[in-house]
Amino acid sequence: MAIETPGKRFGKRLRKSKVFGHGHAAHKSTNADLLITPLVDMFVIIVLFLIANFSATGEILNMTKDIQLPTATHVDELELAPVVMVSNDDIIINGISVARVADLARDDYFTIPALEEKLREQRKETEELHQLANDGTAFKGVVNIQGHKDIPFRIIKRVMFSCSNGGYANINFAVLRGAGPGGEKTASLP
Amino acid sequence: MAGGMDLGDSKGQKKALDATINLVPFIDLMAVTISFLIMTAVWTQIGRLQVSGGGGGDEATPEKDDKTVPVTLLLSEKDLRLTVGTSTFDPIPIVRDAKQQIDLTKLNERFKDVKEKLGPDQTAITVQTEDSVRYEDLVHVIDECIGDGFPSVSVAPVST
C-alpha cells in the first residue's frame, strides 16, 4: 500500500468529489524544510568552544569529595607526576592508603615511613623504565600534593619531608585556579 | 557573484552553475567531534604552585646567590612577620574577610617596599609556617608571594 501524507482522507466514493476530494480547505504543505544553517552555526560554535577548553594532559588528579583544594591565582600548568592525596582521614598514594592522619597526629616523627617507602619504590621503577627505554633525561623528582584545604601544616610538613626523602624534592601543591583581584585569571610569573 | 547567472556564451546544453553542498557528512563530522570533545573535556581548572623545601633531597634546593639577602616570612595563626636579612618588620596581624581568607593587602605593600629596595634579582623567599596553620592559608600566602615577585618559594617549619 502506498504511503500517504497525513491529513484528512476520504473514502473512495468521495475522493473524486469536487467538494471533498479537492475543494476542502486550502492544502497545507506537509513537507517542512529543516533550516540547516543555524544548526551548523551552533555546531561550529560548540566545537570551537570545546577545542578552546581542550586539555591535552587530561585529568591528572582524581577529584574526590573528601579533598577540597585551596584556590590560587598565580599558578602553572599541572604536570604528570605521582600524586599524594591528603584528606582529613588518610594519606593516599596511587590509590593506596599509606597512613591515617589521626595516627600521624600522635607521634612526633618528621616523616611518614610508609609513604617514603612507596615513593622510593616508585622512583626505582621510573628510573628502571627510563633505563630500559634508553631515555637519557634526568629524573626530575616531581610530585603533586593534593591536600584538603583544612589540613594543618603539621601533616603537610611530614608529607613534604617524606617526598623529599623518597627522592621527590620538586613539590607541587595542586590548587584550583581562581580569579585574580580584577576577576581575571592570571598566569604565574616567569 | 556569478553563481547561477546565465553568462550566455554556451552553445550547446547549458550546465547549471549552482552546486548544492551536501551538508550531511559535515553535520555528522561535527556531531562526532562534539561528542569526543565533551567526553574528553576536563571541567575543573587545576593548577600547581611549585615550592621547594621539606628537607631531605637536594635536587630542588636553589643555588645561593651572593647578591640576594635571605627573605623570610613567618606565618603563624595570629600574625605574619617579615624578615629581610637581619632587619625584622613589624608583625602584620592576621585579619580575615567574609570568606575566612587572610587579608594580605598590608603584606603586599610591604613586599613592594622590599622589592624596591632589593631589586628584581631577589626572587627567593622562605615561608616559615607554624604547625597549626591551615593548608589553605599557607597556599594563599605562597600565592601572594609568587604574585608579588618572589617565585622561588621555600616552605619550612618553624625552627624550635
Image (cartoon, rainbow, N blue to C red):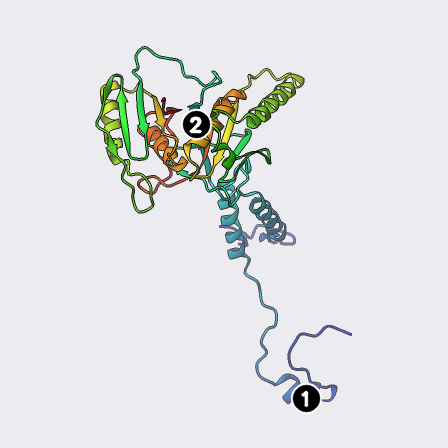
Q: Quadrant of residue A152?
A: top left
Which residue is depicted at the point 70% across and 74% down? A4
A61 to the left or right of A190: right
Q: Secondary structure at mark 2?
A: strand
Given residues B8 and A153, the one toward you in this image is A153
Q: Quadrant of residue B142?
A: top left
Q: Secondary structure at mark 1?
A: loop
Check residue A112 in the rendering and tell me which mark sits there, or answer none.
none
* Residue A121, horizontal then vertical, whole percent: 61, 23
* Residue A189, horizontal then vertical, whole percent: 37, 28
Residue identifier under label 1: A17
Whether callout 1 and callout 2 share a subunit is answered no
Q: Amino acid at mark 1?
A: Ser
Residue identifier under label 2: B50
* Residue B43, horizontal then vertical, whole percent: 50, 44
Which subunit holds the residue at mark 2?
B
- Check contact, mark 1 vs mark 2: CB within 8 A: no
Q: What is the quadrant of the C terminus of chain B in the image?
A: top left
Which subunit holds the residue at mark 1?
A
A112 to the left or right of B63: right
Which residue is depicted at the point 61% across and 48% down? B32
Which residue is depicted at the point 46% across and 42% down? A68
* Residue A43, horizontal then vertical, whole percent: 53, 51
Q: Amino acid at mark 2?
A: Gln
Q: CA distance from mark 1 to mark 2?
A: 87 Å
Residue depth check, mark 1 versus mark 2: number of the one nearer the observer: 2
Q: Residues within 10 Å of mark 1 (few under 14, many from 20)?
A: few
